[in-house]
Image (cartoon, rainbow, N blue to C red):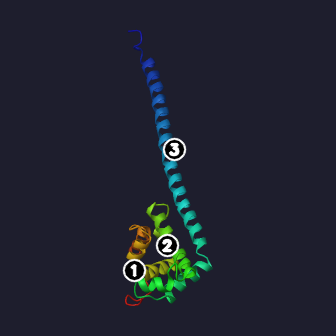
């Protein structure tokens, strides 16, 4: 029983030592919690910065040439069905036009892939491009199954469809009339 203090003064000193140990443990635990919170906030901010950076890279690709191609495809091209599309703008009948079509479609598909991979958010999509995207989807709706068959991939436009869905959820609509082709 040597370890048990008998003197009131010794008991008081032991409590002070225990209190100092408790306080230092509380401080250490609090420091760890604060560190974890700061790390999570830092990761969250980095993620948002990365989303914006990725999106800005794509936005830079939407240059004048892209806007001209998108405008031409959406506003000037007309077709009734996939056969007429292929006759006017297909890869063998009009390679330059088809290249424009692929460029515009690939851009929207790539944006859909970024959203699908959660690397960016559809909310970051600029309104001017959202209007083009919605018009694009409205325009190609009649030939989409034939394009998928031509490209031998039923899921070839899934990312584009996801972009379309997300933009619709945000309230964007096509400026084209439904009966216009």
**Residue name at image x 40 percent, y 80 percent:** 143
Reading the chain from its start, which is encountered first: label 3 or label 1? 3
User: Which residue carries the number 2 mark?
Assistant: 108
Q: Which picture quadrant has residue 54? A: bottom right
Foreground of the two, 24 or 150: 150
Q: Disc 3 versus disc 1: distance between alpha carbons?
A: 51 Å
Graded by Cα atoms within 10 Å as few (under 14), some (14 to 19) or many (20 or more), the crowding at tag 3 reads few
Q: Which picture quadrant has residue 61? A: bottom right
User: Which residue carries the number 3 mark?
Assistant: 35
User: Which residue carries the number 1 mark?
Assistant: 141
On screen, residue 42 above or below 91: above
On screen, residue 51 above or below 11: below
Q: Which picture quadrant has residue 181? A: bottom left
Q: Position of residue 24 (x, y in %)?
A: 50, 32
**Residue name at image x 49 percent, y 84 percent:** 74
Graded by Cα atoms within 10 Å as few (under 14), some (14 to 19) or many (20 or more), the crowding at tag 2 reads many
**Residue name at image x 46 percent, y 68 percent:** 112
Of tags 1 and 2, the one toward the viewer is 1
Q: Position of residue 136 (x, y in %)?
A: 46, 80
């Amino acid at each position: 029983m040597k370890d048990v203090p008998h003197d009131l003064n010794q008991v008081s000193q032991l409590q002070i030592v225990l209190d100092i140990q408790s306080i230092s443990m509380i401080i250490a635990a609090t420091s760890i919690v604060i560190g974890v919170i700061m790390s999570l906030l830092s990761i969250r901010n980095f993620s948002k910065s990365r989303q914006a950076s990725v999106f800005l890279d794509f936005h830079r690709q939407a240059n004048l040439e892209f806007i001209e191609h998108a405008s031409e495809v959406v506003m000037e091209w007309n077709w009734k069905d996939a056969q007429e599309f292929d006759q006017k703008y297909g890869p063998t009948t009009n390679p330059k036009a088809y290249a424009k079509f692929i460029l515009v479609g690939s851009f929207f598909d790539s944006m859909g892939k970024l959203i699908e991979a959660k690397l960016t958010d559809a909310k970051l999509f600029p309104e001017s491009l959202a209007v083009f995207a919605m018009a694009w989807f409205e325009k190609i709706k009649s030939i989409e199954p034939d394009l998928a068959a031509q490209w031998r991939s039923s899921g070839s436009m899934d990312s584009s469809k996801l972009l379309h869905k997300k933009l619709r959820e945000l309230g964007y609509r096509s400026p084209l009339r439904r009966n216009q082709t």
